[in-house]
Amino acid sequence: MMVNDQTNDSPVDAPEGYEETPEAVLALVRTTIHRYNNVLAELVGTADLLLLAKQPRDHDYRSVELIIDRGKKLGALTAKLLRLLSPYERTAERP
């Protein structure tokens, strides 16, 4: 199976005029986590579709199941990371 990257996203670079303020750093981290989560969701979705075409007796069925399982665990981790950022974002927003 050959997979080609169809995204047009570039690496997360600091935008022009970027300042290293706490708010800017938090926004960059949040953006990075969201982009990672989007790629992860596509990976798990593709694996889900692949699993539909397989039978439990297929030699790679368990491997696809593991990809889905690990992807869901990593998705939960990204949600935790975003929750961990919340208190810092509220602190950074205060005048």
Image: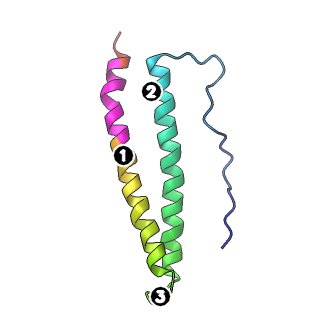
Residue 36 % position (x, y): 51, 47
The stretch drawn in magenta includes residue 85: yes
Q: Residue at x 43, y 87 (%)?
A: 56
- Which percent across, then down, holds residue 61? 47, 81
Q: Secondary structure at mark 3?
A: loop
Q: Which mark is residue 55?
A: 3
Tell me how far mark 1 sits from mark 3, CA to CA.
Answer: 32 Å
Spatial CA distance of label 3 from label 2 is 44 Å
Image check: 6 left or right of 49? right
What numbered label is drawn on residue 79?
Answer: 1
Protein image colouring: rainbow
Residue sitting at 67 percent across and 40 percent down? 10
**Residues at marks 1 and 2, CA–CA distance in whole angstroms:** 15 Å
Q: Say which label, 1 or 2, has the lower sequence index.
A: 2
Q: As shown in the figure, which amino acid type bears the numbered disc 3?
A: Gln
Q: Decide: marks 1, 3 in contact (CB < 8 A)?
A: no
- State yes or no: discs 3 and 2 in contact (Cβ < 8 Å): no
Residue type highlighted by circle 2: Leu
Q: Secondary structure beneath disc 2?
A: helix
User: Which segment did they paint magenta?
Assistant: 81-91
Q: Position of residue 19 (x, y in %)?
A: 56, 15
Q: Residue 26's mark?
A: 2
Q: Which numbered disc flags the more N-terminal residue, 1 or 3?
A: 3
Mark 3 vs mark 2: which is more N-terminal? 2
Which secondary structure, mark 1? helix
- The percent coordinates of residue 60 (x first, y second) are 51, 80
